[in-house]
Image (tube, rainbow, N blue to C red):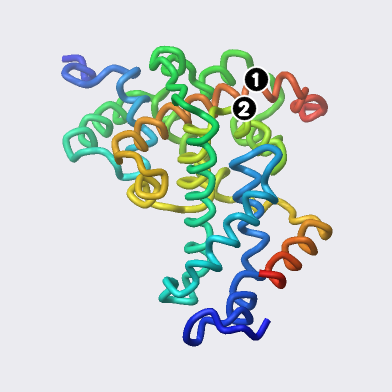
Amino acid sequence: MSELVTGERTKDAFRRLVVPELPGLYSLARRLVRDEAEDLVQEALLQSYRAFETLRDDAAAGRWLKTILVNVFRDELRKRVRSVEELPVEEVEGFSLYRTLIEVDPLPYSDTLHQDFLTAFGNEDVREVLLRLPEIYRAPLVLTYMDGFATKEIAHMLDVPLGTVLARLHRGRKRFEREMWAYAEEANLLAGRDDR
Amino acid sequence: MNEAMGSIPCSEAVKKLWDYLDHAVSPEDQEKVEKHLSFCRTCCGELEFARELRTFLASGSALELPVDVRTRLERFVQEL
């Protein structure tokens, strides 16, 4: 690890910067794709190494690496999916998880029904729900609410207009709520959580 | 006089709640949402749940990086 990349940007410096970021990168990759997370991280590492000289602020390495990973994800998605699957607005608009929980009342002894419903979901359950969403809705949701990127940054990363990101976020949130409910029922997630 | 008169309906308010929380609505829409929330208990509940769901997503910790995957990725970095 002593070969110079450019100037002070050595392989050692690259390794020191990226190794602490591996858990965050892998976690983001697993929320974006089902089976190819490790491949996605490797490709992002390769591309970031080639672009290492463009990193101006080492403190921003985590965001920089995640941005490159999302670029790789976007390019792979474009190769695989010729046309994006936009959902009809009416298909997702009508569903309200908040109202469904009140109407069905799956935890009749709970005083904090909505909170208890959410806490039934572990990290891996949330990932399973995310993976049920088409990628075009999943990515903005993960990047906005789990990784804290601004919608303008996401529009740039995914190379789509800001209005498209906002529309996909809206539909993604609705779809996510609906899939949370479906997953909770299918995985019997609430069983035994209401025993008194 | 009905206090809801001139306000947006629940369906429209609910559509805007997440954007309202994200401060991504226009000042006009913000006013409309707040006017609706001032009398609609159900939509106040929807808003509170949207806030909880947003916090829930943000608080999700990183998914585990298995030791064997970490080892392979570190080796990959070494061999670049």
Percent of width and height locating residue A17: 59, 75
* Amino acid at dot 2: Arg
Q: Disc 1, disc 2: CB below 8 Å?
A: yes
Q: Is residue B32 above or below residue A45?
A: above
Q: Nearer the viewer, residue A160 or B56?
A: A160
Mark 1 or mark 2: which comes first in sequence? Answer: 2
Rendered image quadrant of residue A2: bottom right
Residues marked 1 and 2, same chain: yes
The quarter of the image holding the N terminus of chain B is top left
Count how many numbered circles sit on residues in the image. Answer: 2
Q: Which chain contains the residue that carries disc 2?
A: A
Tell me the mark number nearer the camera, choosing from 1 and 2: 2
How far apart are the alpha carbons under marks 1 and 2? 10 Å
Q: Which quarter of the figure is the C terminus of chain B placed in?
A: bottom right
- Of A27 and A195, the residue lying toward us: A27
The residue that disc 1 covers is A182
On residue A132, the disc is 2
Query: What's under tag 1, amino acid-wise?
Result: Ala
Q: Is residue A18 above or below residue A85?
A: below
